[in-house]
Image (cartoon, grey):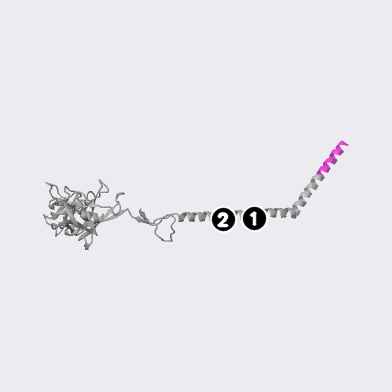
């Protein structure tokens, strides 16, 4: 009996396994049910919608980044060439249009120097001639270079010609407009008159000195404006020349910057000084401080010799008379 029961149980198990396998086979052959398929399709559609939404958000962020980069680029002004800023043409808050200038740049990689040459010396200067450059703005600086070219036309006002010097790789402190002193070796001796550099006055491109036309007993002396050529610049002293100058001609050493041609003056110091009763002497102008013209003492001292074959001119100091100074104050 026991064996029969075990055999029957085995048969039942086999039948159950066959039925389960048949059910699985029927499910496999029948495929997914419609409700499961619809659920899967709905899930896929939701995922596709989420991807599209994320893509739209990414595009919006990319557009915002591009707009920010454009705004950043518009805040930067890139020069077309390197240089240093010489002038700012607009201020914060100003409205500018496209292509409006906002800064003035100067190319500092090379500087063109225009050296004024006296008319009498221009014929002795040739391109390629060595020249030594110095500047009071740069103590200790010195550059040895050469003349590049000469302008073919002389200035009608200063009677001088310009020599062009191309200075490459200038020092940082040498900016356009800086005054330079050039030393040239010229054969022969210089003709002219040696005076202090402070004697010279520069107006309208012309170098000037002042002489004195003596007045009468009741008339003041008058300033005489004399155009001169700058023959040589020796630093503290210069050599000048003019047909109106002579070895004994007295020029104004002190007070010339405040003078005009034919302006009334009073000689207060020098060979021609003749103080009148009631006037000041010893270099002081009547009217006190402020009436006397400015300028450092110049001219030759006792025992001083002129350089380069030039003559020395006697000097004097002048001041505006008290009556004239009071009217102009």
Q: Is residue 7 above or below residue 177?
A: above
Q: Picture coordinates of residue 163 (x, y %)? A: 23, 58
Q: Nearer the viewer, residue 33 or 130?
A: 130
Give the secondary structure at mark 1. Answer: helix
> In the visual, does 98 lie left or right of 297?
right
Q: Position of residue 93 (x, y in %)?
A: 44, 56
Left/right of residue 195 with respect to residue 65 in the rendered view: left
Residue that protrudes farthest toward the front in the picture: 278
Badge 1 density bin: few <14, some 14–19, many ≥20, Cα 10 Å:
few
Observer able to see residue 185: no
Tag in front: 1 or 2:
2
Q: To which quarter of the image does residue 248 belong?
A: bottom left
User: What residue would you read off at disc 1?
Assistant: 49
- Quadrant (top left, top right, bottom left, bottom right) of the N terminus: top right
User: Residue at image x 86%, y 37%?
Assistant: 3
**x and y, in percent, of residue 289 in the image:** 23, 48
Q: Residue furthest right?
A: 1
Distance Cα–Cα, label 1 vs label 2 = 17 Å
The quadrant of the rendering that contains the C terminus is bottom left
Magenta stretch in the rendered image? 1-14
Mark identifier at residue 80 = none
Can you see residue 35? yes
How many marks the image carries: the answer is: 2
The 10 Å Cα crowd at callout 2, few under 14, some 14 to 19, many 20 or more, is few
Which residue in the protein does label 2 denote? 60
The main secondary structure of the magenta stretch is helix
Position in image of residue 287 (x %, y %): 21, 51
Numbered disc 2: secondary structure: helix
């Amino acid at each position: 009996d026991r064996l029969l029961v075990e055999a029957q149980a085995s048969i039942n198990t086999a039948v159950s396994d066959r039925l389960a396998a048949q059910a699985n086979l029927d499910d496999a052959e029948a495929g997914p049910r419609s409700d499961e398929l619809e659920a899967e399709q709905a899930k896929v559609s939701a995922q596709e919608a989420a991807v599209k939404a994320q893509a739209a958000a990414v595009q919006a962020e990319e557009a915002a980044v591009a707009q920010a980069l454009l705004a950043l680029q518009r805040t930067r002004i890139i020069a077309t060439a390197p240089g240093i800023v010489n002038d700012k043409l607009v201020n914060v808050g100003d409205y500018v249009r496209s292509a409006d200038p906002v800064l003035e740049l100067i190319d500092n990689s090379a500087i063109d120097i225009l050296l004024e040459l006296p008319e009498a010396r221009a014929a002795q200067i040739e391109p390629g001639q060595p020249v030594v450059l110095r500047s009071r703005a740069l103590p200790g600086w010195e550059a040895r270079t050469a003349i590049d070219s000469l302008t073919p036309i002389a200035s009608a006002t200063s009677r001088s010609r310009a020599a062009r010097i191309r200075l490459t790789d200038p020092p940082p402190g040498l900016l356009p407009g800086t005054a330079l002193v050039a030393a040239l070796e010229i054969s022969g001796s210089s003709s002219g008159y040696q005076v202090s550099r402070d004697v010279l006055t520069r107006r309208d491109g012309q170098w000037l000195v002042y002489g004195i036309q003596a007045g009468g007993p009741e008339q003041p002396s008058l300033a005489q404006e004399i155009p001169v050529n700058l023959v040589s610049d020796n630093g503290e002293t210069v050599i000048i020349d003019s047909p109106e100058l002579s070895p004994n001609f007295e020029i104004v050493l002190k007070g010339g910057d405040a003078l005009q041609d034919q302006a009334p003056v009073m000689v207060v110091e020098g060979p021609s000084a003749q103080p009148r009763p009631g006037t000041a002497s010893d270099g002081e102008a009547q009217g006190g401080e402020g009436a006397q013209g400015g300028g450092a003492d110049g001219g030759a001292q006792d025992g001083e010799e002129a350089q380069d074959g030039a003559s020395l001119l006697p000097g004097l100091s002048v001041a505006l008379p008290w009556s004239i100074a009071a009217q102009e104050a």
